[in-house]
Image (cartoon, rainbow, N blue to C red):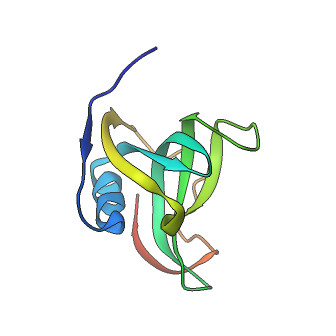
């Protein structure tokens, strides 16, 4: 199993998400029963007012069984977020910068 160094961030989760997007870094967090590694692409506010993250999951837990692929995360359900040393070179195929689910976008690739 490959291990990565991670830097923990103490403060607002949304600040760390935007930092990861700006630096094109993979983030790791616990969500819905397990740890996941995500390439963050868009962070904003959903139409219901909740903070959201659209990202491409590259590894880790998946309740649905689909480990890799595009996923939406409710940031109020995220625990133990950390910025990893892994980088993403470019946006994934299927990336939509104007995410229709979000009424406001804080940051994006």
Kindly identify the residue that appears in the image at 44 percent across and 55 percent down.
79
Kindly identify the residue that appears in the image at 54 percent across and 85 percent down.
49
Q: Is residue 85 left or right of residue 104?
A: left
Q: Nearer the viewer, residue 104 or 11?
A: 11
**Residue situated furthest front in the rendering:** 33
Q: Quadrant of residue 16?
A: bottom left
Kindly identify the residue that appears in the image at 45 percent across and 52 percent down.
40
- Classify 103 as above or below 75: below
User: What quarter of the picture does the C terminus occupy?
Assistant: bottom left
- Classify 51 as above or below 60: below
**Residue situated furthest right in the rendering:** 64
Q: Nearer the viewer, residue 21 or 72?
A: 72
Q: Nearer the viewer, residue 59 or 104?
A: 59
Q: Is residue 21 left or right of residue 77?
A: left
Q: Position of residue 54 (x, y in %)?
A: 55, 59
Q: Position of residue 74 (x, y in %)?
A: 56, 66
């Amino acid at each position: 199993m490959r291990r990565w160094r991670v830097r923990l961030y103490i403060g607002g989760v949304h600040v760390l998400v935007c930092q990861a997007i700006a630096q094109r870094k993979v983030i790791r967090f616990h969500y819905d029963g397990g740890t996941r590694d995500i390439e963050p692409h868009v962070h904003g506010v959903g139409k219901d007012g909740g903070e959201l993250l659209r990202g491409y999951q590259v590894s880790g837990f998946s309740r649905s069984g689909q480990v890799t692929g595009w996923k939406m995360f409710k940031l109020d359900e995220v625990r133990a977020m950390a910025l990893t040393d892994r980088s993403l070179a470019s946006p994934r195929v299927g990336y939509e910068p104007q995410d229709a689910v979000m009424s406001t976008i804080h940051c994006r690739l």
